Amino acid sequence: MDYKQAALKVLEGIGGKDNLVSGAHCATRLRLVLADNSHLNKKANEAVDGVKGVFEAQGQVQIIFGTGIVNKVFDEFSKAAKIETATKEEVKQVAIAKISPFKRAIKTLGDVFVPIIPDIVASGLLMGLLEGLGKVFPSLAAADTFTLLSLFDNVAFVFLPILIAISTAKVFSGNLFLGAVIGMIMIHPNLINAWNVAGMESIPQFSVWFGLYDIGQVGYQGHVIPIVISVCFMSKLEKKLHQFVPEVIDLFVTPLITVLVTGYLALTVIGSVFAFAENWVLVGVQWLIAIPFGIGSFLMGGAYAKTVVSGVHHMYNVIEAGMISADGINTWMPIASVANVAQGAVALKVRDKKIKALTILASLSAFLGITEPAIFGVNIRYMKPFIAGSIGGACGALVASIFNVGATAYGVTGIFGFLITTNSAFGYLLTLVVAASVAFVISWVLGVDENR
């Protein structure tokens, strides 16, 4: 392909170089921040040779070219636009200012939880593997090696508050080690483990704030939002102290005050308030999933893809982490999984060779858990496939509710979801089959308007 020509057409399609604020590229996409997104001509950019999809997310216009192509197009694009190459992080910072406070908060939560997904996945996979081996070979469960490995399978969940604290400190540019200390304070072994509270008749109390009120001597195992809020506060306090404390004593005074103030507030105010709020959110979500006849799961399965389009789907990481921390079972994963698979199962009756090739690649990606190419590259463009995928996701989620499908981790969906599925592997398979089949049939019946 002619990379220079493609770059010039993209530049024209975004309203010219005067409408470009900043630009960078990742492994597959151009990531552009525009002064006025109303000047974006999506249809013109979608027609550019090599483009596999165009969408707007988190204040950026993202144009998918694919690995090995995007960097060459961007080289020509930056020359034509006469811009300096920016990093992805720099472009993100420019884009953040353009999005609403609500979406900015959701994005921040995603930035906190996405980096710790590998830890959760590793523990979840090991937990599922050991559980399966223990059922197939009961004698194996008595072996020392099995017992030793069992120490590994829940370690990420036991110390999840510390992982969250470190990640939160990084997001808010705080000291990672001070963040870890705050996480450790909130699950200190001298506090009663939160998972053991249910069986206690009475809970010892601390008298705090000069006897103003009492709090239970209970840790924050199984909680996520109180940790995020506490470390967010810590990071901001640390920055302020660095500004005012003289350099000669900054090394000693700033960490001391930061830990003392944040730790006390975390245990006496922040933790109590936000743990209460978090519990109500989890109760609400679990109540929806538990609505009789799978009605709640049906509705959420149908709405999931819409939250991906709006960019607020990162909030589900918080819900899933809370579910796993609370009782070890993530019942949201199958809902996300069938919604993803359904968006990839659409059948487009099109003649355009470019769109046919894109559909195959996008479908494969969705079956592996990444739906953006399918949603933004194909389904939203023609809308009917998106509707079909949403209906398929709703039907698949209904089946998941009936079979009580859950998972031992989060961050893995689609075909790879079998590795972390608990309760019913057959039920999980059936949810995927139903979601894909319903989406396929409806999209085939509805067809597609190629002139959109």
Image (cartoon, rainbow, N blue to C red):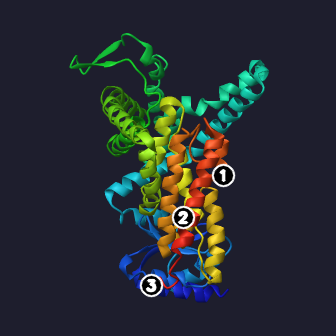
Mark 2: amino acid: Glu
SS for callout 1: helix
Per the model, the C-alpha gap separating discs 3 and 1 is 42 Å
Mark 3: amino acid: Lys
Picture residue at 39% right of the left edge, 62% below the top: 96
For label 1, the residue is 415
| Residue 118 x/y as whole percent | 61, 44
Picture residue at 67% right of the left edge, 43% below the top: 419
| Dot 3 or dot 2, earlier in sequence | 3
Mark 1: amino acid: Ile
Q: Judge depth for marks 3 and 2 and give the one in front.
A: 2
Q: Nearer the viewer, residue 361 or 81?
A: 361
Q: Which of the 4 image quadrants contains residue 74?
A: bottom right
Crowding near the residue tagged with mark 3, few <14, some 14–19, many ≥20 C-alpha atoms within 10 Å: some
Tell me the quarter of the image containing the N terminus.
bottom right
Q: Is residue 175 visible?
A: no
Per the model, the C-alpha gap separating discs 3 and 2 is 27 Å
For label 2, the residue is 372
Picture residue at 60% right of the left edge, 63% below the top: 345
Crowding near the residue tagged with mark 2, few <14, some 14–19, many ≥20 C-alpha atoms within 10 Å: many
Query: Would residue 286 be found to the left or right of residue 71 on screen?
Result: left
| Dot 3 or dot 1, earlier in sequence | 3
For label 3, the residue is 17
| Residue 177 x/y as whole percent | 51, 36
